[in-house]
Image (cartoon, rainbow, N blue to C red):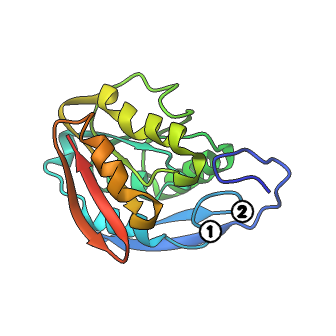
């Protein structure tokens, strides 16, 4: 079986609806086989969304890179951000579009391998990046964010300590002006870079 950053069209479907409340906002998304976090909102993404610091989102543009089934971008859209969402997984893109449409939420959702189809600059780039994709692609997503952030833009990510969070923070400090670990909980780091 392929991983969630591949497109396995032969994989059987097992679509499930996941209801969530973040920042007192109810929304839902769909999961399926072959898409990250089957059947639930994973702890890292939930911690990221609950920790995210933002101001005046109605005027802010955000990118959810590696959006998977869409919990980050859907939440940001409901908070008032203008949101672009992208992933390399076609099944994830279709699930995200369905959940957005059913809830009457607008976000621009499209296929992109890292930043290959990104043309804008953002106030926020937010991601639970695909750690298992390998260090080269992971660093392309994380370090490459600096080229797609506006002045004073922020990258927010979640990474597990046991998956190299400490070394990632050290490496990020060579690329970004400011890198802070905002919180640590149950082995997950929420990292903000400017």
Query: Where is 43 relative to 67, above or below?
Result: below
Element type where label 1 sits in the image: loop
Q: Are circles 2 and 1 on residues that touch, CB within 8 Å?
A: yes
- Whichever of callouts 2 and 1 sits on the residue coming sooner in the sequence is 2
Could one spot residue 64 in this view of the protein?
yes
Query: Where is 123 relative to 80, above or below?
Result: above
Q: Which residue is the extreme one toward the top? A: 119
Looking at the image, which is closer to me, 158 or 21?
A: 158
Task: Report whether 169 appears left or right of 54.
Answer: right
**Picture coordinates of residue 167, whole percent (x, y):** 35, 52
Looking at the image, which is closer to me, 28 or 126?
A: 126
Looking at the image, which is closer to me, 185 or 114?
A: 185
Task: Report whether 147 appears left or right of 37.
Answer: left
Residue of label 1:
38
**Which quadrant holds the N terminus?**
bottom right
Task: Report whether 147 appears left or right of 152.
Answer: right
The residue depicted at 51 percent of the width and 43 percent of the height is 135
**Picture coordinates of residue 185, whole percent (x, y):** 31, 75
Element type where label 2 sits in the image: loop
The residue depicted at 74 percent of the width and 67 percent of the height is 14
- Which quadrant of the structure image shows residue 16? bottom right
Query: Where is 41 relative to 167, above or below?
Result: below
Residue of label 2:
33
Mark 2 residue crowding within 10 angstroms, few (<14) / some (14–19) / many (20+): some
Q: Which residue is the extreme one toward the right? A: 10
Task: Report whether 153 appears left or right of 13.
Answer: left
């Amino acid at each position: 079986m392929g991983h969630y950053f591949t497109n396995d069209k032969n994989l059987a479907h097992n679509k499930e609806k996941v209801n969530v409340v973040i920042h007192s906002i109810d929304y839902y998304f769909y999961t399926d086989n072959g898409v990250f976090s089957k059947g639930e909102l994973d702890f890292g993404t939930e911690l990221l969304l609950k920790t995210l610091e933002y101001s005046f989102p109605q005027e802010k543009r955000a990118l959810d890179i590696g959006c998977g089934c869409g919990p980050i971008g859907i939440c940001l859209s409901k908070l008032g951000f203008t949101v672009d969402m992208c992933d390399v997984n076609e099944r994830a893109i279709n699930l995200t579009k369905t959940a957005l449409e059913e809830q009457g939420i607008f976000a621009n959702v499209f296929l992109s391998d890292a930043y290959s189809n990104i043309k804008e600059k953002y106030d926020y780039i937010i991601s639970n990046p695909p750690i298992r994709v390998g260090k080269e692609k992971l660093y392309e997503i994380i370090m490459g964010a600096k080229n797609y952030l506006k002045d004073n833009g922020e990258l927010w990510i979640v990474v597990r300590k046991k998956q190299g969070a400490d070394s990632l923070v050290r490496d990020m400090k060579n690329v970004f002006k400011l890198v802070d670990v905002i919180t640590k909980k149950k082995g997950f780091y929420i990292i903000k870079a400017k």
